[in-house]
């Protein structure tokens, strides 16, 4: 497993570990003079974006125990991948990336796979 975690090893969505993600959102002052969460274009967005990212540091965590579920805790793994191991992110394990590309390294985890997705024979 390869999971995105914060400094307390709490699992977060994969995109939080993408390069520069935390710089996409920041606390600022909105048009009404109130504190608001703003995106990189200084447009107001849902405050959850700032609550999850501002002041937290995210990194990849390799192997170990726990799940891919955001909010769960990863443990008994490492911040450094083993050179001989292959890892799957939550995105990989749940059907590939948003662009439809296959997962990193072609790792597949359980389930019926693509062949079983269409039901019984043709």
Image (spheres, grey):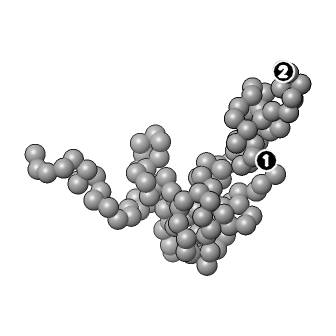
- Is 40 left or right of 101, judged from the image as shown? right
Image quadrant of residue 44? top right
Residue 121: image location, x then y, percent: 11, 50
Q: Is residue 7 above or below residue 118?
A: below
Q: Which residue is mark 1?
A: 54
Taking the image as shown, residue 13 lies to the left or right of residue 50, namely: left
- What residue is shown with label 2? 31
Examine the rendered structure and indicate whether residue 110 appears above or below residue 13: below
Tell me: 96 left or right of 27.
left
Residue at image point 73% right, 38% down:
47
Q: Nearer the viewer, residue 89 or 10?
A: 10
Q: Nearer the viewer, residue 24 or 28?
A: 28
Give coordinates of residue 2: x percent, y percent: 55, 64
The secondary structure type at the circle numbered 2 is loop
Earlier along the polypeptide chain: callout 1 or callout 2? 2
Location of residue 122 (image quadrant): top left
């Amino acid at each position: 497993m390869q999971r995105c975690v914060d400094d307390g090893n709490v699992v977060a969505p994969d995109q939080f570990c993408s390069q520069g993600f935390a710089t996409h959102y920041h606390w600022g002052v909105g048009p009404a003079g109130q504190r608001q969460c703003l995106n990189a274009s200084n447009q107001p967005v849902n405050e959850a974006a700032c609550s999850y990212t501002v002041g937290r540091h995210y990194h990849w965590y390799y192997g170990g125990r726990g799940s891919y579920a955001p909010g769960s805790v990863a443990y008994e793994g490492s911040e450094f991948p083993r050179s001989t191991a292959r890892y799957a992110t939550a995105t990989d394990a749940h059907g590939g990336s948003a662009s439809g590309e296959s997962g990193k390294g072609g790792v597949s985890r359980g389930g019926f796979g693509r062949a079983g997705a269409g039901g019984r024979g043709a």
